[in-house]
Amino acid sequence: MGHRAVVLGKVAEEVLSVERGHPVRVAVDGCSAAGKTTLADELGGVLRGRTEREVIRVGLDYFKRAPELRTTYPIESPESYYYEVYDNEAIRARLLEPLGPGGDRSYTTALREANAVTVVDAPVRTASPQAIVIVDGCFLQRPELDDCWDLRLYVHVSFETVLHRGAQRDAAWMDSPEAAAHRYRTRYIPGERLYVNEISPATHADLLIDNEDPSTPVLTRAE
């Protein structure tokens, strides 16, 4: 068994140790290109191999606010990215609160495509009482959402790594690697610095994964 598989197994044990009278809501938090989605997908696979409980995967990139509703700041600014991109009210009302204490366990996994323009007609489903819900995204420990999590995992990489990975990844849909890097330098990374400085998510989380080298992630319990 490889090192990454061992770490994922330990995280799965932590998830399965959480006992609630409702579905367990797991946050996989971190900056852009930290490896959150891949890790959350793999964690879901490990959990499905270890338990018969329902495992639900949700990505918060499908809960963005429509661009025309982001009016407080210039839309390409770091402030707009941090404060306005995600529809936190809908995330609470359509996903996290129904799965929490006193909720009816009805939820949806998407409101819009990741481009935030195209509306998604996602069905409303009902989670089983013992379900595990793994949610990945940026800014998950903001005050608007923080009280809705039963376990918080923060995936850490340096901002230099965010720039390198993110520019490589996003060059596929932007004009060039240089254009992608410019967006990271001027919008994403400054916006994520606002989050890190305001919330200190790495120390506020329950578990911390250093994912600088995805083949050898390091798991610690945050203090």
Image: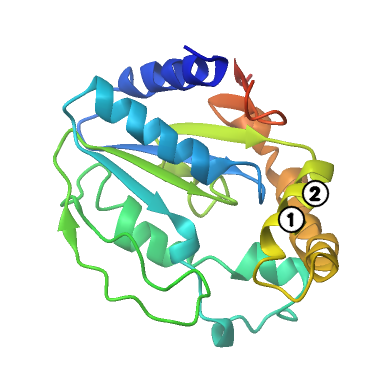
Tags 1 and 2 in contact by the CB under 8 Å rule? yes
Which residue is depicted at the point 75% across and 76% down? 175
Tell me where residue 185 appears, x and y as whole percent: 85, 61
Where is residue 199? Give x, y as percent.
Answer: 68, 43
User: In the figure, residue 18 lies in which quadrant?
Assistant: top left
Q: Secondary structure at mark 1?
A: helix
Q: Give the amino acid type for the residue marked by disc 1 in the picture.
A: Gln
Residue 17 lies, in percent from the top left, at: 33, 17
- Dot 1 crowding, Cα within 10 Å, few <14, some 14–19, many 20+: some
Label 2 crowd (10 A; few <14 / some 14-19 / many >=20): some
Query: What residue is shown with label 2?
Result: 164
Asked if 206 appears above or below 107 in the picture, the reply is above
Q: CA distance from mark 1 to mark 2?
A: 6 Å
- 65 vs 60: above or below: below
In x, y percent, where is residue 154?
59, 34
Q: Residue at x 59, y 51 (%)?
A: 139
